[in-house]
Amino acid sequence: MGQWVRLCGVAEAPKPGAVMETGAGGREMCLANVGGELSAVDNLCPHRQGPLGQGWLEGAAVVCPWHSWVFDLKTGESQYPVHERVDVFPVRIEGDSVMVEIG
Ligand code: FES
């Protein structure tokens, strides 16, 4: 079982269509809002550790700002190139906090 920790306040979370860098539990994360639904993935791109939270959304995927690798926010799998992935962290809202499950 993982542990649920506070990632940020609901008011600080990205608006629909936006991403941001954040972190919790010693992990850097990219928090994204796709159509009002929040997703959290590892912030560090497996290519050269680019900051995914400084990237942008294409549909339900985040694009790395450095060399444009694309990661599905639900599965963490890359759409380009294939066979790469980032960790995905379950997200839920508790009161005015955005919580993520780590570990
Ligand atoms: S560091 Fe992300 S695509 Fe190169």
Image (cartoon, rainbow, N blue to C red):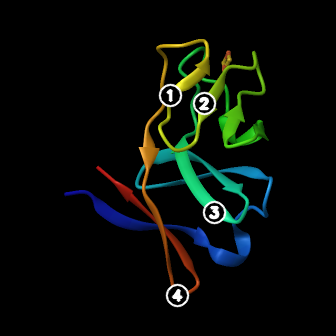
Instruction: Examine the image and state in which quarter residue 12 appears.
Output: bottom right
Spatial CA distance of label 1 from label 2 is 5 Å
Spot occupied by residue 84 in the image (x, y as percentages of width and height): 49, 17
Q: Residue pushed farthest left?
A: 1
Residue at numbered disc 3:
37
- Element type at mark 3: strand
Q: CA distance from mark 2 to mark 4?
A: 29 Å
Q: Position of residue 78 (x, y in %)?
A: 56, 23
Amino acid type, mark 2: Phe
Q: Are marks 2 and 3 in contact (CB under 8 Å)?
A: no
Q: Where is residue 27 drawn, in percent x and y?
A: 46, 46
Residue 95's disc number: 4
Do the CB atoms of the residues marked 1 and 2 lie less than 8 Å apart? yes
Q: Looking at the picture, tell me which residue is in the foreground, 30 or 39.
A: 39
Which is nearer the N-term, disc 2 or disc 3?
3
Residue at the image position 47 percent from the left and 38 percent from the top: 75
Q: Is residue 15 above or below residue 96?
A: above
Residue under the image location 67 percent in, 43 percent down: 60
Q: Earlier in the sequence, mark 1 or mark 4?
A: 1
Q: Earlier in the sequence, mark 1 or mark 2?
A: 2
- Secondary structure at badge 4 equals loop
Q: Earlier in the sequence, mark 2 or mark 4?
A: 2
Q: For mark 1, what is the residue?
A: 77
